[in-house]
Amino acid sequence: MKALLLIDIQNDFLPGGALAVVDGDQVVPVANRFMSEFPLVVATQDWHPRNHRSFASQHPGRQVGEVIDWDGLEQVLWPDHCVQGSSGAKFAPGLNLDGIDHVIQKGTDVHIDSYSGFFDNGHRKSTGLEQLLHDHGVKEVHLVGLATDYCIKFTALDAVSLGFKTCVVLEGIRGVELSPGDCAKAIEEMLAAGIEIV
Ligand code: VGL
Ligand code: ZN
């Protein structure tokens, strides 16, 4: 059994959004096209409280893009994005919501970020995605969405280490690319971990 994982295809990651990914909107038609080929479609949704500590606005004197030490973890400071209930947190217009079977929200704890759809960045708490996939007998996951160098990478790395056959669909992902080469590096890391890039 295989599942399609739609990662954070939300307004704030599209052109014009708070944390815009270049050409982020181009993953939408790819996601829609793939949905019908998978018996299970799960979408993750970045879903932050408005005072989430990943927001630079919560750290006076710090800038967006700065990296800080946060309880022993490196944390990039982001613009306010995907605030619970905001329009930026909504799924992209044009995404076929009827094709989504389950939504997994992440980043809901003010004290820790969660790039992966499976666990927070400290691997302390599970989002329930692993259990959901096991409950449906899923052995293989295919990923489409945003962003290549953050949520796609960390979700795919967790998936493969949890024992799922993991494929990332290159035409259906786009990255933040905070530093030039971040996306290429992310692809290298995923390949090295045994993830298929298709
Ligand atoms: C993401 C940065 C912050 C992502 C989410 O979806 O890749 N990136 N929050
Ligand atoms: Zn976020």
Image: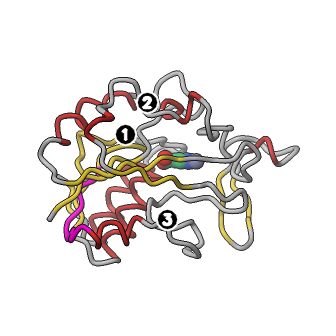
Q: In this view, does 142 lie above or below 90?
A: below
Which is nearer the eye, 190 or 91? 91
In the rendered image, which residue does mark 1 sit on? 174
Residue 159: quadrant of the picture: bottom left
- Relative image position of residue 67 (x, y in whole percent): 69, 55
Relative placement, left or right, of 142 versus 57 is: left
Disc 1 residue type (three-letter): Arg
Residues under numbered marks 2 and 1 in contact, where contact means CB atoms less than 8 Å apart: yes
Comes first in the chain, label 1 or label 3: 3
- Relative image position of residue 60 (x, y in whole percent): 87, 45
Density class for disc 3 (Cα within 10 Å; few <14, some 14-19, many ≥20) is some
Considering the numbered disc 3 on the image, is that residue within a helix, a strand or a loop? loop
Disc 3 residue type (three-letter): Thr
Q: Is residue 103 above or below residue 9?
A: below
- Relative image position of residue 168 (x, y in whole percent): 25, 54
Rendered residue at 35%/66% (across/down): 132
Image quarter (top left, top right, bottom left or bottom right) of the N terminus:
bottom left
Rendered residue at 23%/48% (across/down): 169
**Mark 1 or 3, which is nearer the eye?**
3
**Mark 2 or 3, which is nearer the eye?**
3
Considering the numbered disc 2 on the image, is that residue within a helix, a strand or a loop? loop
Which is nearer the eye, 43 or 66? 43
